[in-house]
Amino acid sequence: MGISREIGAHYVQEKGTTFTVWAPEAEQVNVVIHGKLKQTIPLQREAFGYWVGLSEEATPGTRYSFKLDNDKELPDPASQSQPDGVHKASEVINPNYNWTDQNWKNLPLEEYIVYELHVGTFSEEGTFEGIVNKLPELKELGITAIELMPIAQFPGNRNWGYDGVYPFATQNSYGGPEGLKKLVDACHKTGIAVVLDVVYNHLGPEGNYTSSFGPYFTEKYNTPWGAALNFDDAHSDHVRNFFIQNALMWLRDFHVDALRLDAVHAILDTGAKHFIQELQEHVNHLEQQQTQTYYLIAESDLNDVRLINPIEQGGYGLAAQWMDDYHHAIHTMATGETDGYYSDFGKPEHLVKTLKHSFIYNGMYSEYRKRTIGTDATANPAKQFVVCSQNHDQVGNRMLGERLTKLVSFEMLKPVTALVILSPYTPMLFMGEEYGEENPFQFFVSHTDEALVEAVRKGRKEEFAAFAWQGEAPDPQSEETFNNSRLQHNYKNNEKQNQLREFYKELIQLRKATLKNTSKEHLEAALNEGETVLDFTHTSAGLRCIVNFSKEAQSIATDQKGWKVILDSADEKWGGPSSTYTSENTILQPESVVVLQATA
């Protein structure tokens, strides 16, 4: 499985702190202990350019930095805490925590109902503690797993998290490592699993000192973020080890249940064993050691089943991957948008195909990309695909960050979510969608380098060139942009929002009760003659879902005998105009969904 080497600062009670850093080109490395101790300790060089030393006096809370060849002091690339931000000294943390989740076992993947959230904007506090306070609401909604957008230390205190520069350090403004452990422990006590979004395809620009230590990057490839991380060039074993140790830390030391691997198509590796496969093998080994189950979930735009196929079949063995095709098929049908990458979608038959076969682009030519993409995923279990109608990318990478609430009618929100929650796939909600949050989710940063801020502003404008969006992009650096993106959580004082949330609750309960072992093999899907109504049935569960995308009422010609209506989004209790659908009168209200259960 390649090199496995612990890195960073590790404190052991009554023994002190061992410091390990990889700096293969350095002639001399010292660790500088700050504060009252004011020590400078020379480290000993070991094989492959690792430098190691012990300070018996350094304890949790001690600040330290590394000095290479008597040059300037730098934070630890594997720092687990940056209490004063990305440019200042690192901190030794206490590895011990009084965990209360000894009886916790990760949920089966098919029981995951994921809720993606951004720590800084989800709660009033904008911290891990703020999430803890809202866990009872998420539990009551029916959520079984939360997914945290990246929490690795980034510059300032406003960021989506994808500009992180210390992958091992938990963002100080969110509550640091202690706050994250408290959140995970509380989630497990509530019966909720924790998925953490990690970024192994690039590091952010500000506060990134890794290149001073060694060849963390390679010029072999160009990426949207500059030089690529070095996963397959000279010295790459140790860069791979850096990120593998990171993943193992979150799972082992923070009790995280699953990792969402950001944009794995940008992890560039032409070696014989791809980094992703090696990572999965290490996680398999950790599972055996810990007698616990962990999931790796990829984000990829390649529609490639190699990610999730078993290793013995030539795959990488991951548990699941996000599936954009499903989102795009729903979004284009609900909104009518066909700009940018949405130009590849918008046909009603796409929904039938993606329900039955997962990927729409499964070896098809993409007009938008001007090439053939994808592989056939028909044989892969439905639980391996995470689907949504909104997520941080699809909302936040719109110019104005509008949620579906602003793009479609209140009535349309209900069939859209039924397509996600009652699909055979692993459903994911984006924070606030369950009650129709009206605040946008916009892109925000808090860099201190003005040239970098300007580059970010320029880059955002260029991203929107392929879309026909009107207006001016919000300033990512402005605190107002961040504040505009915070959830209002006003559903208790808003009848419509509360009705929508109750509708979500009903669908989630329905899924839990009837769709425990969903599969594509036992799913039938068809369109009516006008291609405005989608009718799909989980045959083994006896559950049928009929969706009217049209703004007109639609009559259904199919045989309705043997079915009873158990939910109609047009019902007044869900804020609808009134239900008109019965087994005798098969009229669907505009923009509605009817769910039926087999009576025989």
Image (spheres, grey):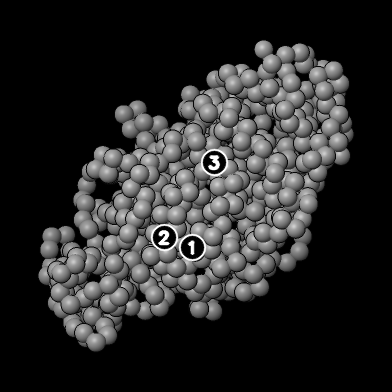
Q: From this viewpoint, is residue 370 visible?
A: no
Badge 3 is on which residue?
113
Badge 2 is on which residue?
182
Q: How many numbered discs? A: 3
Asked if marks 3 and 1 touch (Cβ < 8 Å), the reply is no
Q: Which residue is rendered at x = 77% and y = 36% of the image?
A: 569
Which quadrant of the view contains residue 293?
A: top left
Amino acid under disc 3: Ile
Q: Earlier in the sequence, mark 1 or mark 2?
A: 1
Query: Rounded to the nearest whole Å, what is the CA distance between mark 3 and mark 1?
Result: 20 Å
Q: Which mark lies nearer to you, 3 or 2?
A: 2
Whole-percent x, y for residue 526 in the image: 70, 22
Badge 1 is on which residue?
128
Q: From this viewpoint, is residue 253 visible?
A: yes
Say if 559 sits above or below 408 in the image.
Answer: above
Q: Which mark lies nearer to you, 1 or 2?
A: 2
Whole-percent x, y for residue 560 in the image: 77, 16
Q: Residues within 10 Å of mark 3 (few under 14, many from 20)?
A: many
Amino acid under disc 2: Lys
Mark 2 secondary-structure assignment: helix
**Figure quadrant of the C terminus:** top right
Whole-percent x, y for residue 205 in the image: 45, 69
Q: Earlier in the sequence, mark 3 or mark 2?
A: 3
Q: Residues within 10 Å of mark 2 (few under 14, many from 20)?
A: some
Query: Rounded to the nearest whole Å, what is the CA distance between mark 1 and mark 2?
Result: 8 Å
Say if 296 sits above or below 440 in the image.
Answer: above
Asked if marks 1 and 2 touch (Cβ < 8 Å), the reply is yes
